[in-house]
Amino acid sequence: MGDVIRLENRSVIRVNGPDAVDFLQGIVTNDMRDVAEGQALYAGLLTPQGKLLFDFFIVGDGEGYLLDTDSSVVSDLLKRLMFYKLRAAVSIEELSGVEVYAALNGEMETGAKMIVYNDPRTQGAGKRAIVLDSGRMMDAPDPVRWLAHRIDNGLPEAGFDFQYGDCFPHDIAMDQLNGISFKKGCYVGQEVVSRMQHRGTARKRPMIIQAEQSLPPAPARIEAGGSPVGTLGSATGHKGLAEIRLD
């Protein structure tokens, strides 16, 4: 269990009810038809203008769906989901006493009141687990190791590498991290995202960078020939993630 890390900055929302699939299908960037029990999607919820408001994992739990999301925006996400609920037959609630874990080497024990799933973003991302019985696992948080793992696998995270409401999904490579379906029907912001995909108009991408010396704290401007070309986000030692202009 040495490679299992508790992620302190994650919260979980449950979406249940007979309309849960259709409700989420109409608002998130990925295809709910691909979610089965014990499996997960990476997805986002956008503004009508296509900017990313929230990103999360949607996990099938047999009764409905669990959304593994950033704790700093969980209240705002709840409000947004309730806003879109209208007359849909769904219940939406934040779960208390829940913990989220990541297995860096892709190995994790399973048990009752515990949902283990593959992180769908990259093959090397490992596994994650939602533990519905708080305190069941004793592994401590290790933000430094999680940071290094994210950088090695090119996994941007809100608050470090981008800000919600300030970027398009393509800017943080959601299209390359299995976070967008281009075959499903309409969802909020879909027209803008599809246009960027088909026209190839993404202007920025997250990239793993390597330096000869220790990288400075984020955010730090990256220049080439005296002109700004990007911004450094997550960094540890000589490696980091940076948002780089493609031009």
Image (cartoon, rainbow, N blue to C red):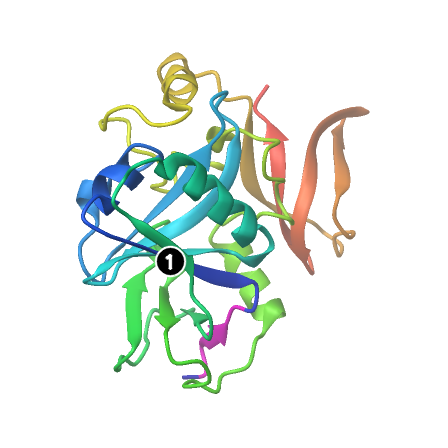
The segment highlighted magenta reads: 2-7
| Quarter of the figure that contains the N terminus | bottom left
Name which quarter of the figure residue 67 lies in: bottom left
Camera-side residue: 221 or 185? Answer: 185
Residue type at mark 1: give it.
Gly
* Residue 5 part of the magenta-drawn span: yes
Residue 217: percent from left, percent from top: 77, 52
| Quarter of the figure that contains the C terminus | top right
Furthest-front residue in this view: 87
Camera-side residue: 218 or 116? Answer: 116
The residue that appears at 48% across and 87% down in the rendered structure is 138
Residue 96: percent from left, percent from top: 46, 70
Q: Residues within 10 Å of mark 1 (few under 14, many from 20)?
A: some
Image height of 149 relative to 141, above or below:
above
Q: Work out whether residue 102 can be spotted.
A: yes
Name the residue tied to disc 1: 124
